[in-house]
Image (cartoon, helix red, strand yellow):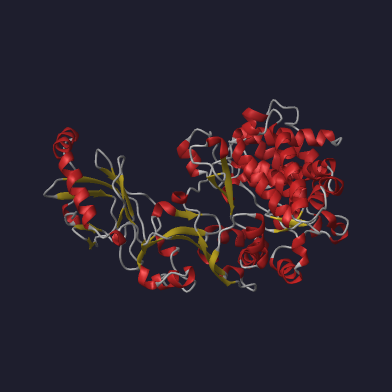
Amino acid sequence: LRSPPISSFHMISSQRKREIELMMMYSRFRIAALAALLAMPFSASSFMLPSAHRAHVGISSISGGYNEVIVPTTKYSSARSSLNLDEQDATTSLEGMSSPSSSSYGLADVEVNIPTDLTIGALVDETTSVWVEENTVSLDDIIRDLDGIPLSKEYFAEKMGISTENIESYTCPEKDVFRGFMSNACRVRLLPGGETAFYKSIVFEELDHAQEKLKKSPHKLARDVKSYKVVADFLSSKACEEVTKKAGVHIPKCYDAQARPDHSDPMKSKFSFLFADYAPWNGWYQQWLLQEDEECKAALTTLAKIHAFFWNGSSFWDDADAAAELEASIWESGSYVQPKAQGFHQYKEVTKEWETKRLKFEKELSSFDYWDNLGERLQSVAKECGHQAHPFANDELAESYRKYRTFTHGDPKQANLFFRGKTSSGSTDDDYDELELEVGVIDFQWSGFGLAATDVAHFLMAAIHADRLVDGGEEAYLRYYYDELQRYLVEFGACSTKDDAIRHLSYDTFMEQYDTAFLDKCRLVIAYTWARFTEPVEKDDEVGCARTMNKTSYNKSIPNVVWLASRCDEILKSRGV
């Protein structure tokens, strides 16, 4: 495809004429497009190695619905485009173009002439309409090392243990890119073999959210620097290897971790990670929120395995070297929620923030009797709950809670969990009743020592849809987790028998710790995270769910907001508050 010179861009004069032309040439176009695509070597599709001075062209494979043409560059502007496609010729019409320069790039028999200052995401469907996506950033900002140099195929070969002779190139489709508040990442596919990995880049100076923290909460930058060091240290530890091998917990292998923390100037800190990939073609998937009973229970079983494996007095602690390494690798007191990580000022802001944040949910919450006083009541116990939910951040409490001390994930939201179905030994894929779920766990930034009940409260509040928690669902999942924990405490040597495990941690004690952790997390939600609730999404809204995949339940689901606030009220009342 070649566009005319910019000075000669024009638009179709008649929509009807366009419809007639499209009907006449559509079948010819599909054949021509398929022929052009098949003429390209597969290594040319989706991605070409980055350069700051050229556009990058990628064409995805043809499917029944549509084909994507992604042309990312380091700059972008707003424009709209339409294509007249003919077997012999093609012209491109653009509006809103800001630069007179353009460049041409060949891909086999297909040639595209595009202004170099534009990033274009094109959708070619049955009407051959094309548009430009605003603010699309190129992969240049991700797929490079900490010195800004594009990653080479030799890098992947060395880190992943693959011969360079077996790697001709690699692709990084934009659809497999993740851009978060504090990191960017993408899936890398090596060609021609098809092996994949997940590359994550954290360059503080290039992250808008880091810039915002520098202005409003500079203490959190130092915290975040350490959090990425925790990831690197834990994933390379013997403890991680042991819980994967002996407890059967799926944690992605870390092929490479590069850390350049700058404690004197956190904004200059840089990190990168190359992980084994939870690829969808290997059966792995994620959920917007957990809505299936099997998924909820599988995740709780995984948490029970992790907690029991590292429980105080378990067999793991017999290996003095592995124990010492773990102690040095993770947070002394884990959890994203804990006041020490968020700031002790939150204790005093719950009442004020409730008065303003509740207005986002006035229609749903104003009829409840806690509408006027929930914030004030929660603030009255916030400090006490913060200490008790995270006792290992407090020297005075640490020793009295030591018997319950274990490794906690610290942020077990649904976005940090992957699922994959597998069949039991001797069964087939058709034996649905025998189907089991494997759970993959990622993101150990906030992993440290804590209480299992605090981890479980975080999981239930952040990862599961409210439909599963009402009408006794929450209590059923807590009982399920508790039973699983008792089982694995015996299996991993923390307790000798099930009766011993029950005496060690009674259900009543577990529930008391859970309720305390629930109230503590409500402190965080009301005083801080509800500021991020910008749009309610229904569970059957596929587009909205995809857009809010990384958000926690209470930041996107109205039913979860109602459930959380109502349970907070119930727990406070049960304690006479």
Most distant residue in the top direction: 367
Front-most of 339 and 302? 302
Residue at position x 53%, y 36% in the image:
432
Q: Give the percent coordinates (x, y) of residue 408.
A: 71, 55
x, y percent for residue 227: 64, 63
Q: Out of 377 and 548, give the one closest to the viewer.
A: 548
- Quarter of the rendering occupied by the C terminus: top right
Going by the image, does 89 lie left or right of 378?
left
Q: Is residue 432 above or below residue 146?
A: above
Q: Report if residue 537 is visible in the image.
A: no
Residue 77: % across, % down: 35, 54
Is 462 on the left or on the right of 51, as rendered?
A: right
Residue drawn at 41 percent across, 73 percent down: 154
Rendering quarter of residue 300: top right
Q: Quadrant of residue 102?
A: bottom left
Q: Is residue 515 visible?
A: yes
Q: Is 95 in front, or is 283?
A: 283
Side (left or right) of 400 relative to 528: right
Q: Residue at x 38, y 59 (%)?
A: 194
Q: Is residue 426 left or right of residue 59?
A: right
Q: Position of residue 98 (x, y in %)?
A: 29, 56
Quarter holding the N terminus is bottom left
In this view, 62 is above or below 334? above
Residue pushed farthest front? 426
**Number of numbered discs:** 0
Between 286 and 263, the residue placed more toward the observer is 286
